Image (cartoon, rainbow, N blue to C red):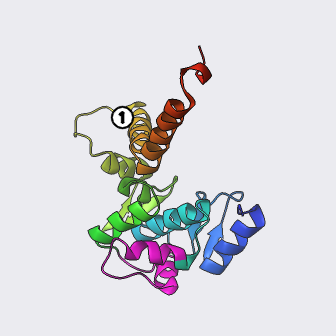
Amino acid sequence: MAMTGECVRLHYAVSGIRVNRGLSASSHTMTGVGDGVRVEEAIGLQIARLRAERRMSLTELGEALGRYLDRPWSRQAVHQAERGQRSFTAAELTALALALDTSVPALFRAEGDRIELPGGAVSPEEYRGILLNRERDTPLDGVEELIVALHDIGEVLSRPALVRLARIGEVADQVAGPESRPA
């Protein structure tokens, strides 16, 4: 079941997230935070968004994480992660990316919010630049978005599910024979 606007609003109200502009999960601010969000909160929002898009319950995501970690996460642990109430190890971020069929950098995405770090806030542009792992002297005029898009396309095309689907298509073509193929 896709999340309607009211479901998104209810989910974020229960999670302690205040939706500022419209009903988009990406246009938010967290309660109790200054002008931006902590990086853990940005990751948590991505986890919640991706889990909802994949129609996974908290328990299902926790069990999926157990396939990659030494044990599954409880639904409470997943809920805390979605609310930005926990830090993540590199292994946990990798497991989350695998369980949610995404990339690790995608978990760090923050839509237009300043990212608060212990030493101060980072602008959205600077934060995106960090995620792109670019050289200091590289110009940012539009190239950043192109690099992200190309990387995302590469990630999607290399996913095991798409590879399996392509193989199924090839087998179907072989079984159907040459007469059923379009000219």
| Residue shown at 75% from the left, 62% from the top | 4
| Residue shown at 47% from the left, 62% from the top | 100
Please tell me whether residue 113 is drawn above or below residue 138 in the rendered image: below
Residue 141 at what x, y percent from top left? Answer: 40, 30
Please tell me whether residue 163 is drawn above or below residue 110 in the rendered image: above
Q: Is residue 144 visible?
A: yes
Q: Nearer the viewer, residue 183 or 68?
A: 183
Q: Is residue 75 magenta?
A: yes
| Residue shown at 43% from the left, 40% from the top | 157
Q: Quadrant of residue 148?
A: top left
Which range of residues does the magenta coloring cover? Answer: 60-87
Residue 149 at what x, y percent from top left? Answer: 44, 37
Q: Residue at the top extreme?
A: 183
**In this rendering, would 20 be left or right of 32?**
right
Q: Nearer the viewer, residue 160 or 157?
A: 160
Please tell me whether residue 178 is drawn above or below residue 175 in the rendered image: above
| Residue shown at 60% from the left, 78% from the top | 15
For the N terminus, the image quarter is bottom right
**In this rendering, would 115 be left or right of 90?**
right
Q: Quadrant of residue 151?
A: top left
Residue 41 at what x, y percent from top left? Answer: 47, 70
Q: Is residue 32 visible?
A: no
Number of residues whose C-alpha sits closer than 10 Å to that of mark 1, classed few (under 14), some (14–19) or many (20 or more) = few
Q: Nearer the viewer, residue 102 or 172?
A: 172
Q: Quadrant of residue 183?
A: top right
Residue type highlighted by circle 1: Leu
**In this rendering, would 178 be left or right of 119?**
right
Q: Is residue 52 magenta?
A: no
- What secondary structure is found at the residue carrying circle 1? loop
Residue 132 at what x, y percent from top left? Answer: 32, 45
Residue assigned mark 1: 140
